[in-house]
Image: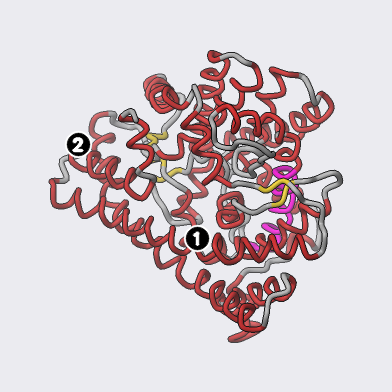
């Protein structure tokens, strides 16, 4: 096993704290402060992993049981990011993806094409997957490397565009989220929000978990909403009463624990982020920089957590309703909140708008994931991840940018390529225009 693979196998709970520790030393924070920041962030990620495991180990099987019980015809299981990321790292592109992505970041910083200083090394797997899937489809290593470059450059620009929303809505000054799911899908929410603003009556509808709690009293509290969702899914899965009640309590725990564990990440991160900004301000006077980090930070917001739980059953419904779809959402159900995390901020915490844009986001994601099954399965076979059968993933397997780059090398799905390029391209261009006009800010609704 080479050194790079060994480091990658440590996972984000060890890898990111190590990066933060080294960064703290470079920023002259001292061994003690740097170590405390790194360990605190590590504790936060361990906490998130435990909470997500409640979803993966309990809600995931319930969703699968429900799909089988009602004979929904979804035969290809979404392996999620836990299944897709090893494919990326084990591919012929995996060994070069990290240095290429870092080089792209450095070059863009030097040319002043971005203000994002990305320290989220683990999530470079998104860029590695982009290169791996393009290389698999085209048979060209160098086209795969180009895929990494394009995906990385686009992610850093998305980090620039959405940083004001991360600051103003989530309260994370100087932070950006150049992420391969939340940021990639966010332009769809930008267009959705603009359209809703043009519709009389509809633009005044504002629903968030705080208002639900105020109107419904204790029944509207996040924990109780989680418990209700858990028990309903357990009942639809055909569980016994005891298992239904257990699932309800587990989902209630998710609603309460997720914001708590995220606080540890923020506690460890903010001193390092502040020191990095101060150093950059001194070295490059007059230039503002953003520290690029994982969207797990956004899960500290109650509206993001509420939307995440709502979209677990809703994503299953969407998968059922898409004509010809065979992909069963499973592995990524636990992290479905990442797909809509920035969208929540774009809508100012308005769950009504998030439901609309999130439905569009997940519809496109599942539709694309279904079309990508063939090349996704080939990548899995090439890397030895599977020995037979078919696989899919929502995270990256359902990315519109992945799909566009892949199809441009094969031209096998011409009409879907035109449709996805037209829709997603319009959303991106509209986002750029809004950013240049200074209008890429949270919608004026009640924020939490």
**Vertical order, 123 against 130 (above or below):** below
Residue placed most toward the observer, 391 or 367 = 391
Disc number for residue 123: none
Left or right: residue 352 compared with residue 439? right
**Vertical order, 36 against 150 (above or below):** below
Residue at x 70%, y 64% (from the top left corner): 65
Disc number for residue 26: 2
Q: Can the viewer see residue 290 in this picture? A: no
Q: Which quarter of the rendering shows the N terminus? A: top left
**Residue 428, quarter of picture:** top right
**Vertical order, 53 against 120 (above or below):** below
**Residue 147, quarter of picture:** top right
Dot 2 lies on which element?
A: helix
Q: Can the viewer see residue 189 in this picture? A: yes
Residue placed most toward the observer, 426 or 412 = 412
Please rate how many residues cluster around mark 1, counting C-alpha atoms within 10 Å: few if below 14, some from 14 to 19, many from 20. Answer: some
Q: Main secondary structure of the magenta part?
A: helix
**Vertical order, 298 against 62 (above or below):** above
* Residues at marks 2 and 1, CA–CA distance in whole angstroms: 32 Å
Is residue 448 inside the magenta stretch?
no
Left or right: residue 370 compared with residue 147? right
- How is colour applied across the structure in the image? secondary structure
Instruction: Give the x, y percent position of residue 435.
Output: 58, 37
Q: Which residues are magenta?
A: 350-366
Instruction: Give the x, y percent position of residue 89.
Output: 46, 32
User: According to the image, label 1 marks what residue?
Assistant: 52
Callouts 2 and 1 close, C-beta under 8 Å: no
Residue placed most toward the observer, 61 or 151 = 61
Residue at the bottom extreme?
217
**N-terminal-most mark, 2 or 1:** 2
């Amino acid at each position: 096993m080479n050194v790079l693979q060994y480091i990658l196998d440590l996972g984000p709970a060890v890898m990111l704290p190590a990066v933060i520790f080294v960064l703290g030393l470079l920023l002259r924070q001292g061994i003690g402060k740097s170590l405390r920041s790194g360990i605190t962030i590590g504790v936060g990620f361990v906490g998130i992993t435990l909470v997500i495991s409640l979803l993966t180990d309990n809600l995931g099987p319930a969703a699968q049981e429900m799909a089988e019980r009602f004979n929904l015809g979804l035969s290809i299981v979404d392996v999620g990011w836990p299944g897709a990321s090893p494919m990326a790292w084990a591919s012929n592109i995996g060994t070069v993806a990290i240095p290429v992505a870092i080089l792209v970041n450095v070059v863009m910083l030097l040319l002043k094409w971005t203000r994002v200083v990305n320290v989220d090394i683990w999530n470079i797997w998104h860029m590695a997957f982009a290169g791996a899937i393009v290389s698999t489809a085209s048979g060209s290593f160098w086209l795969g490397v180009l895929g990494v470059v394009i995906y990385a450059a686009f992610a850093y620009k998305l980090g620039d565009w959405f940083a004001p929303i991360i600051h103003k809505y989530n309260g994370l000054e100087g932070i950006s989220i150049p992420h391969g799911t939340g940021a990639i899908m966010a332009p769809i929410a930008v267009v959705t929000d603009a359209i809703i603003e043009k519709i009389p009556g509809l633009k005044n509808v504002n629903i968030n978990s705080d208002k639900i709690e105020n109107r419904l009293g204790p029944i509207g509290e996040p924990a109780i909403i989680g418990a209700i969702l858990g028990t309903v899914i357990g009942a639809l899965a055909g569980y016994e009463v005891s298992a239904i009640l257990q699932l309800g309590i587990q989902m209630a725990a998710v609603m309460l624990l997720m914001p708590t564990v995220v606080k540890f990440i923020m506690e460890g991160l903010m001193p390092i982020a502040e020191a990095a900004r101060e150093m950059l301000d001194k070295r490059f006077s007059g230039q503002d920089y953003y520290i690029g980090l994982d969207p797990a930070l956004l899960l500290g917001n109650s509206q993001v957590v509420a939307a995440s739980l709502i979209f677990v059953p809703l994503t299953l419904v969407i998968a059922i309703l898409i004509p010809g779809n065979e992909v069963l959402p499973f592995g990524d159900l636990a992290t479905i909140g990442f797909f809509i995390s920035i969208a929540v901020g774009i809508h100012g915490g308005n769950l009504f708008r998030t439901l609309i844009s999130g439905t569009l986001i997940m519809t496109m994601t599942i539709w694309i994931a279904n079309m990508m099954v063939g090349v996704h399965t080939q990548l899995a076979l090439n890397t030895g991840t599977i020995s037979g059968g078919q696989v899919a993933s929502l995270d990256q397997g359902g990315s519109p940018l992945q799909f566009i780059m892949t199809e441009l090398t094969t031209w096998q799905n011409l009409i879907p390529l035109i449709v996805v390029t037209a829709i997603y391209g319009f959303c991106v261009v509209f986002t750029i225009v809004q950013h240049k006009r200074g209008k890429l800010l949270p919608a004026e609704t009640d924020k939490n």
